[in-house]
Image: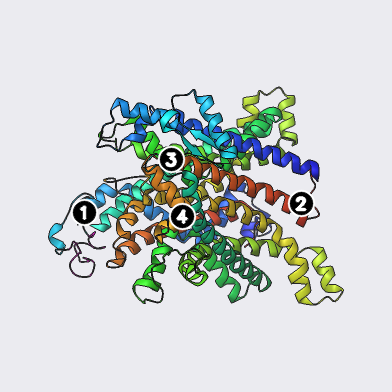
Amino acid sequence: MTDDAVDGGKRGGEFVGRSPGQLAWLRLRRDRVALVSGGALIFFVLLAAAAPLVAKLYGKGPQDRFPELLDRNGFPLGYAGVSGEHWFGIQPGIGRDIFIQVVYGLRTSLMIAFTAAVLTIALGVVVGIVAGYVGGWVDAVITWIIDLTLAFPFYIFCFAFVPLAVNQFYGPRDEVSPWFRPGLLVLIFVMFNWTTSARLVRGQVLSLREREFVEAARASGAGLGHILFRQLLPNLWAPILVTFSLNVPALITAEAALSFLGIGVLEPTPDLGRLINDSIRYLRDVPSFTIIGGTTLFLLVLAFNLFGDSLRDALDPKSSR
Amino acid sequence: MLRFLVKKLLLALTTLIAVSVVTFGLFFVVPRNPAELMCGDSKNVCSPERIEMIERRMGLDKPIVTQYGDFMRGIFVGRTIGSGETARDCPAPCLGFSFRNDEPVTDIVARTLPVTLSIVFGAAVVWLVLGVSIGMISALRRGTVLDRLAVGTSLVGASMPILLFGPLLLIGLVYETGLLTYPRYTPITEDPVAWASAMVLPWFALGFLNSATYARLSRAQMLETLSEDFIRTARAKGLPKLTVYGRHALRAAITPIITIAGLDLGAYLGGTVITETVFGFTGLGKTALNAALNLDMPIVMATVLLAAVFVVTANVLVDVLYAVIDPRVRLG
């Protein structure tokens, strides 16, 4: 990126002072991929947030069924049941509108992924800063815990953990609260995922703590808390932001995978992974059903990944594509 | 070198022991009553006698530490589970018996592990060859249409969930065109051709998707290596291009790729459950999933442990390999 306004800050012979944040914002605004993917992200988030409004305008809720639009074998009439009334068609067998399922599914996916990502980063940053700055046996113990966590096979552990936890809190005939499974997923994601950001932050802090400004703070008698969160943390925002924006799509994929396998979110909560699971047994006869759910998931993850990449490029002056 | 190796092995061993303690505790101690879990699906309620019988047969009436010790000893030397008339022999490596159908877990693992191994190793060949060669070519042809195409495809491919790609392959190659049949696993020892033809779909699905990440990584590595002095020196002294890029540059660029590949392999061996589910294979991952849904804890315990062994072994191997390949690595 060799552009005057961006690189030199030089305009008409005069230097314009710009903070690193402003520079990053400028670079991001010039990046077409960032604009498109950012726009797509905003669209997805708004659509998910406004799901009840969309349902009202569209005239159908996520649990409404239209059995009159299915034939005797449970297959939708016409081409996959697509019509002006039902944009994405009708779910075979159960007769729900697919479009509104997708909208509400986005909501579940985004909510779980965002909550988990925020908590993951918060935990990872705190642990990483402490391990990197304090060092010594604290660092050794934390590093060992990180290695231990990485040795656990994520999916298999989830399979084991989720049914056990449900069994622990609910009897076989009890109705499970609709918040319980999403909450459990968030917990598991945080448990397994904090290690990445902790490692990253630890590495950064290891080099930052030898710098003069930290030494100056220490010499002027600053407490541990002040050095960790007032001196070191502000220097870490760029990598934290990038990790966060690349963490969300990874969590969306994991959540969809678990729900696809019948471990994550279950009926009747709408969810993208669960929707693909519903569709897979009709793959031969109604392929559009799987393709719609899968494509939505794909576009969502793609938008996040592209935006995360652009954000990394914008925040890192040395990066080049 | 020896000291480095011993240190790595000790660390790996402690990790494995910790994993086994945590898993054992979680699966056998935390549940309110494992015997109750075992005997009943939701419909039939267990009689106290039946619960007591299960507890005796599984050795759940003993103290927890003894249970753990018995379990670990069983893996290495075998053991006898239960006592009296219900005692059963379980030769090493003993992983216990399934709660549901009493089959030895070792047999179940021996039956399903080859399926997962076949999928993962085949797919790894695909993603390494495809990914590294795409990455190399686009690095050497930087800025051309070819490079842009490769970068774009790998960006998109890295975001493609197998939940979409697997079904798309099934639609495109099986249901709509009939080019392939829906895969059915045949052991390689029985019929190598049938084995390979059943594996084509999962190899391609998993291999293609993973190759995207490898293409990006090897492109970046290759670009970095190409800008180093020793490459310029090699070119300047008149070595042919093929030797410079294929031998000197490749060797320097491939080290981090081997690291990632080793770790990925370790992680995937624990089960490629989504690939297995989409293409209808009963591998280790699918078995673990079904067992977990049935709360069949001995199988789940065995698969978690096995997967952890794969991950930890891959870690150690990668560290050692790293030191062998890259002379710049200092052992400490």
Residue B154 placement (x, y as % from top left): 54, 65
> For the residue carrying disc 4, how many other residues have a C-alpha within 10 Å: few (<14), some (14-19), or many (20+)?
many
The numbered mark, 3 or 1, whose residue comes first in the sequence reads 1
Q: Chain of mark 4?
A: B
Per the image, the residue denoted by label 4 is B283
- Spatial CA distance of label 4 from label 3 is 17 Å
- Amino acid on which disc 2 is placed: Ala
Q: Which residues are magenta?
A: A73-92
Lateral position of residue A172 relative to residue A20, left or right:
left
Residue B266 placement (x, y as % from top left): 59, 51
- Spatial CA distance of label 1 from label 2 is 63 Å
> For the residue carrying disc 3, how many other residues have a C-alpha within 10 Å: few (<14), some (14-19), or many (20+)?
many
Lateral position of residue B17 relative to residue A216, left or right:
left
Q: Chain of mark 1?
A: A
Residue A275 position by quadrant: bottom left
Tag 3's secondary structure? helix
Residue B138 position by quadrant: bottom right
Tag 2's secondary structure? helix
Residue drawn 76% across the image and 51% down it: B323
Per the image, the residue denoted by label 2 is B323
Per the image, the residue denoted by label 3 is A160
